[in-house]
Amino acid sequence: MKKIAILQSNYIPWKGYFDIIGLVDEFILYDDMQYTRRDWRNRNKIKTPQGLQWLTIPVDTKGKYLQKINETRVVDHEWAFKHLKAIRLNYSHAPYYEKYEPVLADLYEKASSLDYLSEINYLFLTGICRLLGIRTKITWSSDYTLVPGKTERLAGLVLSAGGDYYLSGPAAKDYIVDEVFEDAGIELAYMDYEGYPEYPQLHGDYVSTVSIIDLLMMTGPDAPSYMKCFRS
């Protein structure tokens, strides 16, 4: 059985996103879909003494309502240094700050020279997967032939990748037609985000859904024990 997941790329996403990557054999970035504003594509949250703070990559959307994620360009490359500064400011007292700061600094340095949001997200996703020990193959939907139809396209991607099992995010239950996967001989499953254990955090009450950066800074090599993809 080959397990496949297909999601649009996110910027430094939360642990649940990385769990989906770690639970499959191939993770397909669905970035030839339409870019959505005020979403997770170009932003995420970290904890600060003043509360949650958005880290947002500035992108060009003016008059480009139908542009795809992989067509979305960055408009100000200074964002990378600003985001790294915010992480340094708010996590300098975290237990594993010194361990991960050099790695993040290198990722942000590389990201500062990239023009497209998809490239930036891919850089961070693969870099953080290496830190977590996730070895899943990450590809792009543009690597495969796409067919018409919302559910049909997903099933087609799974088959094109040689898969027979599809792990979906739970929100997709609202539009996925189960019969399309059944007819294609693909087992369909949905990710369960319930039951994550809490871990020590800085800056007030516990928040589960912040960027994976928080988990790494606070738990270091023990981060996998707070995730689902590493459970036997």
Image (cartoon, grey):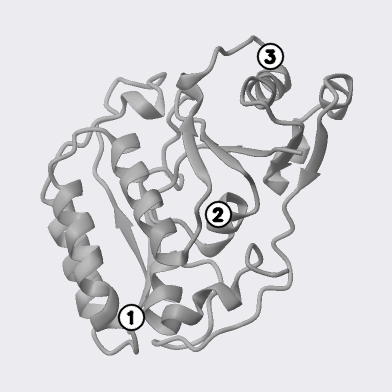
Residue at point 34%, 55% (across, down): 127
The answer to whether any part of residue 91 appears in the image is no
Relative vertical location of residue 151 with respect to residue 222 in this rendering, above or below: above
Q: Report helix, strand or loop for mark 2.
A: helix
Residue at point 20%, 76% (across, down): 88
Residue 43, x across and y down, in percent? 37, 51
* CB contact under 8 Å: marks 3 and 2: no
Residue 172, x across and y down, in percent? 71, 39
Relative vertical location of residue 76 with respect to residue 181 in this rendering, above or below: below
- Gap between marks 3 and 2 measured at Cα: 25 Å
In the rendered view of the protein, which quadrant contains the N terminus? top right
Q: Residue 17 got which mark? A: 2
- Gap between marks 1 and 3 measured at Cα: 45 Å
In this view, the residue in front, 148 or 175, is: 148
Q: Residue 100 got which mark? A: none
- Single out the mark in the foreground, 3 or 2: 2
Q: For mark 3, does the 10 Å Cα neighbourhood hold few (<14), some (14 to 19), or many (20 or more) residues?
A: few
Q: Earlier in the sequence, mark 3 or mark 2?
A: 2
Residue 90: name its quadrant.
bottom left
- Single out the mark in the foreground, 1 or 3: 3
Task: Name the kind of residue labelled 2 in the image.
Answer: Tyr
- Give the labeled residue for mark 3: 149
User: Taking 209 as reference, is 119 left or right?
Assistant: left
User: Taking 195 as reference, is 134 left or right?
Assistant: left
Residue 154, x across and y down, in percent? 67, 25
- Give the labeled residue for mark 1: 50
Q: For mark 2, does the 10 Å Cα neighbourhood hold few (<14), some (14 to 19), or many (20 or more) residues?
A: some
Q: Report helix, strand or loop for mark 3.
A: loop
Residue 215: name its quadrant.
bottom left
Relative vertical location of residue 99 with respect to residue 65 in this rendering, above or below: below
Residue at point 69%, 70% (across, down): 231
- Gap between marks 1 and 2 measured at Cα: 26 Å
